[in-house]
Image (cartoon, rainbow, N blue to C red):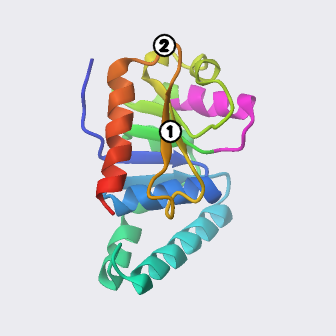
Protein backbone atom coordinates (compact mmCIF):
# COMPACT_ATOMS: atom_id res chain seq x y z
CA UNK A 1 0.00 0.00 0.00
CA UNK A 2 1.14 3.52 -0.76
CA UNK A 3 1.34 5.62 2.34
CA UNK A 4 1.48 9.24 1.27
CA UNK A 5 1.10 11.99 3.82
CA UNK A 6 -2.14 13.92 3.46
CA UNK A 7 -1.42 17.51 2.42
CA UNK A 8 -4.13 18.36 -0.11
CA UNK A 9 -7.85 17.90 0.60
CA UNK A 10 -10.68 18.21 -1.91
CA UNK A 11 -14.07 18.91 -0.34
CA UNK A 12 -16.98 18.21 -2.68
CA UNK A 13 -19.99 20.32 -1.71
CA UNK A 14 -19.88 23.76 -0.05
CA UNK A 15 -23.07 23.67 2.00
CA UNK A 16 -23.16 23.71 5.79
CA UNK A 17 -21.09 20.55 6.15
CA UNK A 18 -18.80 21.07 3.16
CA UNK A 19 -17.70 24.60 3.99
CA UNK A 20 -17.28 23.59 7.65
CA UNK A 21 -15.06 20.67 6.67
CA UNK A 22 -13.07 22.95 4.34
CA UNK A 23 -12.65 25.44 7.20
CA UNK A 24 -11.42 22.93 9.81
CA UNK A 25 -9.08 21.37 7.24
CA UNK A 26 -7.58 24.76 6.31
CA UNK A 27 -7.30 25.67 10.02
CA UNK A 28 -5.25 22.49 10.48
CA UNK A 29 -2.85 23.60 7.72
CA UNK A 30 -4.14 21.54 4.77
CA UNK A 31 -4.41 22.96 1.27
CA UNK A 32 -8.11 22.73 0.36
CA UNK A 33 -10.07 22.84 -2.88
CA UNK A 34 -13.81 23.24 -2.31
CA UNK A 35 -16.14 22.21 -5.15
CA UNK A 36 -19.74 23.04 -5.90
CA UNK A 37 -22.06 23.42 -8.89
CA UNK A 38 -21.86 27.24 -9.09
CA UNK A 39 -19.34 29.96 -8.30
CA UNK A 40 -22.13 31.82 -6.48
CA UNK A 41 -22.52 28.94 -4.01
CA UNK A 42 -18.74 28.78 -3.57
CA UNK A 43 -18.52 32.55 -2.96
CA UNK A 44 -21.25 32.30 -0.31
CA UNK A 45 -19.35 29.42 1.33
CA UNK A 46 -16.13 31.47 1.36
CA UNK A 47 -18.03 34.37 2.98
CA UNK A 48 -19.38 32.02 5.68
CA UNK A 49 -15.88 30.62 6.32
CA UNK A 50 -14.40 34.14 6.59
CA UNK A 51 -17.22 35.17 8.98
CA UNK A 52 -16.60 32.07 11.11
CA UNK A 53 -12.83 32.61 11.22
CA UNK A 54 -13.35 36.27 12.17
CA UNK A 55 -15.64 35.13 15.04
CA UNK A 56 -13.04 32.58 16.20
CA UNK A 57 -10.37 35.31 16.13
CA UNK A 58 -12.60 37.71 18.11
CA UNK A 59 -13.08 35.09 20.82
CA UNK A 60 -9.34 34.43 20.90
CA UNK A 61 -7.55 31.14 21.38
CA UNK A 62 -8.28 29.17 18.22
CA UNK A 63 -6.87 31.65 15.70
CA UNK A 64 -5.41 35.14 15.71
CA UNK A 65 -6.78 37.95 13.52
CA UNK A 66 -3.47 37.88 11.63
CA UNK A 67 -3.93 34.20 10.74
CA UNK A 68 -7.43 34.58 9.21
CA UNK A 69 -6.00 35.63 5.82
CA UNK A 70 -3.46 32.82 5.93
CA UNK A 71 -6.18 30.21 6.53
CA UNK A 72 -8.41 31.73 3.82
CA UNK A 73 -5.43 31.59 1.44
CA UNK A 74 -5.31 27.80 1.83
CA UNK A 75 -8.85 27.43 0.41
CA UNK A 76 -9.31 27.43 -3.35
CA UNK A 77 -12.55 26.80 -5.23
CA UNK A 78 -13.47 24.82 -8.33
CA UNK A 79 -16.57 23.88 -10.31
CA UNK A 80 -14.97 20.58 -11.32
CA UNK A 81 -14.67 17.41 -9.24
CA UNK A 82 -12.13 16.07 -11.75
CA UNK A 83 -9.95 19.18 -11.45
CA UNK A 84 -10.22 19.35 -7.65
CA UNK A 85 -9.19 15.74 -7.03
CA UNK A 86 -6.36 15.46 -9.59
CA UNK A 87 -3.72 16.32 -6.93
CA UNK A 88 -5.72 15.45 -3.82
CA UNK A 89 -4.47 13.10 -1.12
CA UNK A 90 -7.94 13.00 0.43
CA UNK A 91 -11.36 13.75 -1.00
CA UNK A 92 -14.25 14.34 1.39
CA UNK A 93 -17.63 14.30 -0.30
CA UNK A 94 -20.35 16.37 1.41
CA UNK A 95 -23.13 16.53 -1.18
CA UNK A 96 -26.83 15.95 -0.35
CA UNK A 97 -27.81 12.50 1.02
CA UNK A 98 -28.69 11.03 -2.38
CA UNK A 99 -27.00 7.70 -3.17
CA UNK A 100 -27.00 8.26 -6.94
CA UNK A 101 -25.44 11.72 -6.59
CA UNK A 102 -22.80 10.39 -4.19
CA UNK A 103 -21.98 7.47 -6.51
CA UNK A 104 -21.64 9.91 -9.42
CA UNK A 105 -19.16 12.02 -7.40
CA UNK A 106 -17.18 8.91 -6.38
CA UNK A 107 -17.06 7.58 -9.94
CA UNK A 108 -15.70 10.90 -11.21
CA UNK A 109 -13.23 11.16 -8.32
CA UNK A 110 -12.08 7.59 -8.87
CA UNK A 111 -11.37 8.33 -12.54
CA UNK A 112 -9.35 11.48 -11.77
CA UNK A 113 -7.73 11.21 -8.32
CA UNK A 114 -4.19 9.85 -7.91
CA UNK A 115 -3.95 6.13 -7.01
CA UNK A 116 -2.88 6.91 -3.42
CA UNK A 117 -5.87 9.21 -2.73
CA UNK A 118 -8.38 8.30 -0.05
CA UNK A 119 -11.99 8.86 -1.10
CA UNK A 120 -14.20 9.69 1.88
CA UNK A 121 -17.89 10.40 2.29
CA UNK A 122 -19.45 12.53 5.00
CA UNK A 123 -22.65 10.48 4.92
CA UNK A 124 -24.36 9.63 8.17
CA UNK A 125 -26.91 7.19 6.81
CA UNK A 126 -25.97 5.73 3.42
CA UNK A 127 -23.89 2.54 3.15
CA UNK A 128 -20.17 3.14 2.57
CA UNK A 129 -19.91 -0.18 0.69
CA UNK A 130 -22.58 0.86 -1.82
CA UNK A 131 -20.93 4.25 -2.39
CA UNK A 132 -17.56 2.48 -2.82
CA UNK A 133 -19.10 0.24 -5.51
CA UNK A 134 -18.95 3.26 -7.87
CA UNK A 135 -15.13 3.05 -7.78
CA UNK A 136 -12.40 0.65 -8.85
CA UNK A 137 -10.75 1.15 -5.44
CA UNK A 138 -13.30 0.25 -2.76
CA UNK A 139 -10.43 -0.48 -0.36
CA UNK A 140 -9.59 3.27 -0.45
CA UNK A 141 -13.16 4.43 0.34
CA UNK A 142 -14.07 5.34 3.92
CA UNK A 143 -16.68 7.30 5.81
CA UNK A 144 -15.51 10.41 7.66
CA UNK A 145 -18.72 11.72 9.19
CA UNK A 146 -18.44 15.16 10.77
CA UNK A 147 -21.10 16.32 13.19
CA UNK A 148 -22.62 19.76 12.61
CA UNK A 149 -21.16 22.34 12.80
CA UNK A 150 -17.68 20.96 12.16
CA UNK A 151 -15.90 24.12 13.34
CA UNK A 152 -17.59 24.23 16.74
CA UNK A 153 -17.70 20.51 17.51
CA UNK A 154 -14.10 20.01 18.67
CA UNK A 155 -14.07 17.72 15.88
CA UNK A 156 -16.67 15.16 16.73
CA UNK A 157 -16.18 12.78 13.83
CA UNK A 158 -16.94 9.13 13.08
CA UNK A 159 -14.58 7.13 10.87
CA UNK A 160 -16.60 4.32 9.25
CA UNK A 161 -15.20 1.41 7.26
CA UNK A 162 -17.01 -0.11 4.32
CA UNK A 163 -16.86 -3.86 3.71
CA UNK A 164 -13.66 -3.48 1.65
CA UNK A 165 -12.01 -0.47 3.33
CA UNK A 166 -8.41 -1.35 4.13
CA UNK A 167 -7.15 -1.04 7.69
CA UNK A 168 -4.42 1.34 6.45
CA UNK A 169 -6.99 3.68 4.87
CA UNK A 170 -9.15 3.65 8.02
CA UNK A 171 -6.07 4.45 10.13
CA UNK A 172 -5.00 7.28 7.83
CA UNK A 173 -8.55 8.70 7.94
CA UNK A 174 -8.47 8.48 11.74
CA UNK A 175 -5.02 10.16 11.84
CA UNK A 176 -6.35 12.95 9.60
CA UNK A 177 -9.25 13.54 12.00
CA UNK A 178 -6.84 13.56 14.97
CA UNK A 179 -4.74 16.21 13.16
CA UNK A 180 -7.82 18.46 13.06
CA UNK A 181 -8.18 18.19 16.82
CA UNK A 182 -4.46 18.85 17.43
CA UNK A 183 -4.67 22.06 15.40
CA UNK A 184 -7.11 23.61 17.90
Q: Which residue is mark 2?
A: 164
Q: Is residue 104 magenta?
A: yes
Measured along the vertical axis of the image, is residue 137 above or below residue 75?
A: above
Name which residue lies at 25% across and 32% down.
Answer: 4
What is the magenta range?
A: 95-109
Residue 63: x %, y % from top left: 34, 75
Question: Would residue 161 be visible to someone looking at this image?
Answer: yes
Is residue 132 toward the left or the right of residue 60 in the image?
A: right
Residue closer to the observer: 162 or 153: 153
Q: Tell me the quarter of the image containing the C terminus.
A: bottom left
Q: Which residue is mark 1?
A: 158
Residue 17: x %, y % from top left: 60, 54
Badges 2 and 1: C-beta atoms under 8 Å apart? no
- The label on residue 14 is none
Name which residue lies at 26% across and 22% down.
Answer: 2
Measured along the vertical axis of the image, is residue 22 above or below residue 98?
A: below
Tell me if mark 1 has few (under 14), some (14-19) or many (20+) residues whose alpha carbon lies within 10 angstroms of its own. Answer: some
Q: Main secondary structure of the magenta part?
A: helix
Q: Is residue 19 magenta?
A: no
Amino acid sequence: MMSTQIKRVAVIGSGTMGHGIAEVSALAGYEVVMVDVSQDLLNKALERIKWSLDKLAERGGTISKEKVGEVMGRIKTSLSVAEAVKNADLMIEAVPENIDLKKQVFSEADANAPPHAILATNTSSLPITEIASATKRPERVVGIHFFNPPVLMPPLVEVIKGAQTSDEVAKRAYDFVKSLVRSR
